[in-house]
Amino acid sequence: MKTSTAKIMRSKAKHQFTILLAAMALAFSCKPEIAEPTGGETHFLIRCESGKNTCGDQLTCLCGVCTLPCAERAACEALPAAQCVPGCVTDHATAPGVCEVSCVIDADCGVVSAFHRCEQGVCRAGSLASGGSGGSGDGADAGTNSCERGTVSGNQVLILGDSFFATTHQITAYLEALARDAGAVVVGERYRDRSSLRANALALGGNGIGDQYASGVSEAEVKVVVMNGGGADTLLGSCDSANASCAVVTAAAAAAQALFAEMATDNVEQVVYAFYPDPGDANVKARVDALRPLIQSACENAPLPCHWLDLRTAFAGHYAEYVQIDQLNPTDAGARVSAEAIWAIMQQYCIAQ
């Protein structure tokens, strides 16, 4: 009797275990398949064509990839490892920034998906649409593999500007480190930083930034210029009314135009113009606001490729962390984020790669 009861109990236990295994198998088979860890949006950073509904319900086709427009990092928090970087030229009006994931090697893109690869410093997946440039505005989209590397040495990159660059020179240091990590700057090469704390205006009190350029080009060939300018003019100059008719503002814009023309004559290949985050002083800010569109227009209509970078996007929401107590110049963290924004532009347009 005891033996029979034991057999029955063993049989029940076996049957229950079988049911449990079946239930577990069913549970796993019914679990929604999440192939890639893309923050719930599997289209992120996959190539696309504008006007075609290929990015799903949550993302938008910007700069040739499925992403989100942004003005600060918080807009990208739902996407894995994404940061807000300046958008491409053609989408600038609607997307001052876009969510991107930077990388050095393919493994860095594993956080997006197993299929994303590192291409010119950003993660990409999918094939490039036929005949498309991805919307970069000049046919040099970050999603293509057409970037010719090694054509610009480190010492052919010249840094020009005022105290925003020159107070600590950390922007150049961080920028050079990013380039070195990407293999764009080899051992023994350096970017030539001619930014200065004095004689650093575009027009006021002479042509300080123009003199920086003249000094740099006299020393060695210059193929790429990374610069700012106009801050010293607006800080030290004065206007009866801070608008486009202010003599300080118009003189600075005219000096920038003349400098771009000189660079084109000297066969400089690319310019990256990094314009300031908002200064803290209201009067200076008003003059900077008046100057910004004039310098932007001069850059975008220059006789050589000039890439406009508005650092307000990178600094948005972080002024206390990124700007020194002088309310003008970057802290170490501000220098780092400035360098990252500049490097993103350089990678996007295959500049000194």
Image (cartoon, grey):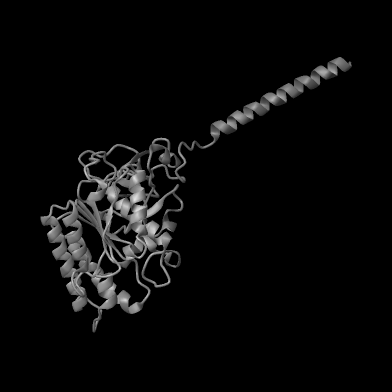
- Image position, residue 306 (x, y; %): 20, 56
Q: Quadrant of residue 133?
A: top left
- Image position, residue 136 (x, y; %): 24, 50
Q: Identify whether 105 is placed above or below 223.
A: above
Q: Identify whether 326 is placed above or below 120.
A: below
Q: Is residue 77 left or right of residue 249?
A: right
Taking depth in this image into account, of 62 and 298 the one nearest to the observer is 298
Residue furthest out toward the bottom: 240
Q: Identify whether 226 is placed above or below 285.
A: above
Taking depth in this image into account, of 123 and 287 the one nearest to the observer is 287
Q: Can residue 287 be seen?
A: no
Quadrant of the drawing holding the N terminus: top right
Residue under the image location 33 percent in, 65 percent down: 164
Q: Is residue 38 left or right of residue 269?
A: right
Taking depth in this image into account, of 129 and 192 the one nearest to the observer is 192
- Image position, residue 344 (x, y; %): 32, 51
Circle count: 0
- Image position, residue 8 (x, y; %): 80, 19
Q: Is residue 175 left or right of residue 132?
A: right
Residue furthest out toward the right: 1
Q: Can residue 158 be seen?
A: yes
